[in-house]
Image: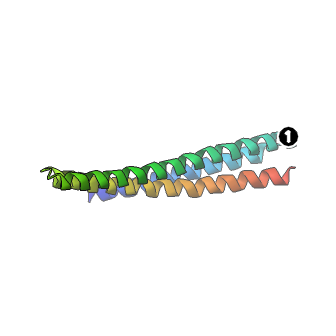
Amino acid sequence: MQETFYVVLGYVWRVAVNIVELLVVLYIFYHLNARFEIIVIAVLGLIYTTIRTVAWALFHGLNNLGRNLGREFLYLQSLLGDQTVEERAREASEQAKRADRVIMKTYIDGFFISAIWIVCFYQLLANL
């Protein structure tokens, strides 16, 4: 029960942090006056969201690679008759559950990164 509470709290925290980040971006654009400032900040925001998107994609790719390699190593160990295969498979299953929670949190991040990208892109187009 307590673990479920911490999992839900983790998701709520992730959403709250991303909402604050989006509100900061909106606040910054609201208080900019000069057209040049808005364009520069919008371009910087687009660069920021691009870097975060590339990191997000890299994380997912490496996570899939690691999981697949882990399965292959477990299969090879079972073929070689390793006695610790069941224990390692159980550990891999627990790690996969934790990784799935992290992946869901990255999808939350991805949604808010997309929202920031839309705000920056709109501001750039509106001020060109």
On the question of residue 124 being in view, the answer is yes
Q: Is residue 71 left or right of residue 59?
A: left
Q: How is the image coloured?
A: rainbow
> Which element is circle 1 on?
helix
Q: Position of residue 108 (x, y in %)?
A: 52, 57
Q: Nearer the viewer, residue 93 or 34?
A: 93
Q: Amino acid at mark 1?
A: Phe
Horizontal side, residue 126 vs residue 79: left or right: right
Indicate the quadrant where residue 7 lies: bottom left
User: Whole-percent x and y of residue 56?
Assistant: 53, 50
Mark 1: few/some/many CA within 10 Å (<14, 14-19, 20+) = few
Q: How many marks?
A: 1
Q: Position of residue 54 (x, y in %)?
A: 58, 47
Q: Does any portion of residue 9 appear in the rendered image?
A: no
Relative image position of residue 72 (x, y in whole percent) = 30, 54
Left-right relation of 2 to 100: left
Left or right: 53 in relation to 2? right
Task: Name the image quarter holding the N terminus.
Answer: bottom left
Q: Residue at x 17, y 51 (%)?
A: 80
Residue at screen point 54% across, 51% down: 57
Residue 55 in the image: above or below residue 111: above
Mark 1 lies on residue: 36
Q: Residue furthest left?
A: 83
> Among all residues in the image, which is located at the extreme front?
80
